Amino acid sequence: ITLRRDGDVDEGVAGEQDQHVVEEPHAGHGLGNAGTVEIDADLHVGLELTPARCEELERQRDSAAALSYAIRSLDFRMASRGQLRDRLVRKGHDERTIEQTLDRCAEIGALNARVLAATRARRFRDGGHAAFSTQQRLRRQGFADADAASAIDEVYADFDEEAEARRLLAA
C-alpha cells in the first residue's frame, strides 16, 4: 500500500508487502531525498487492521503531512523554530507531531536558527538598531536565547553604536 501525497491509498498486488512513502520535492533547500518520509508499515492486501494499528498509521500519516507542510513553508519563507511551531499549531497538528517535525527539520538542515538569527540581526543592525534592541526583537520572533546571543556576538562584533547614533541623528 502506498500513501500518496493527496492522502489516497494505492493498493498493491494481493500479498505484496510494501511501505508507505510520502515524497515531496524540496528544490528550495536542495535537500534531495532528505525530506522524504518513510512510514514503516508491514501491510498487505487482505490484512485485518486493528483499531490500534489504524490509529498508529493515522499518526504516521499526520507526521508525514506535518513534515511536508513544514518543508514547503520553509521553502517559501525561512522561520525560526518558534515561528514554524506557530505555523504547525495553526494547521491543527498535535504537540507530539509538532516536536517530531521540528526536530526532523533541524536534522535535515531545513531549520537553521543560528543562520537565520544572524541574517535578521544584520538586517536590524543595518537599520540602525542597537545590539540590545536586536536581541529583544530576535527573542520576540521565537529565537532561543543562545541563537540570539550568538547572532548578536557575530553581527555586532565591529559595530560602533555611538557612531551609528550620530549618523542617525545627523540624517
Image (spheres, rainbow, N blue to C red):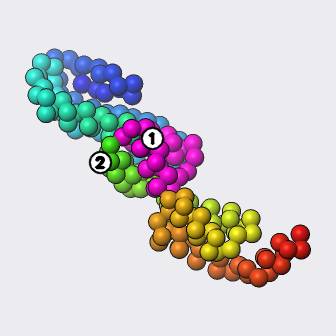
In front of the other: 21 or 69: 69
Give x and y (percent) for residue 98.
Answer: 36, 47
**Residue 46 located left or right of residue 155:** left
The region drawn magenta spans: 67-93
Which mark identifies residue 90?
1
Q: Secondary structure at mark 1?
A: helix
Q: Residues within 10 Å of mark 2 (few under 14, many from 20)?
A: few
When asked about the image quadrant of residue 45, the answer is top left
Name the residue tied to disc 2.
96
Give x and y (percent) for residue 67.
Answer: 39, 42
In front of the other: 137 or 11: 137
In front of the other: 47 or 80: 80
Taking 15 as reference, is 111 above or below it? Answer: below
Q: Which residue is at a point 28% across and 26% down the rendered structure image?
A: 2
Q: CA distance from mark 2 to mark 1?
A: 15 Å
| Tally of numbered discs | 2
In front of the other: 101 or 10: 101
What's the amino acid at mark 2?
Arg
Give x and y (percent) for residue 20.
Answer: 27, 32
Q: Secondary structure at mark 2?
A: helix
User: Looking at the image, can residue 72 be seen?
Assistant: yes
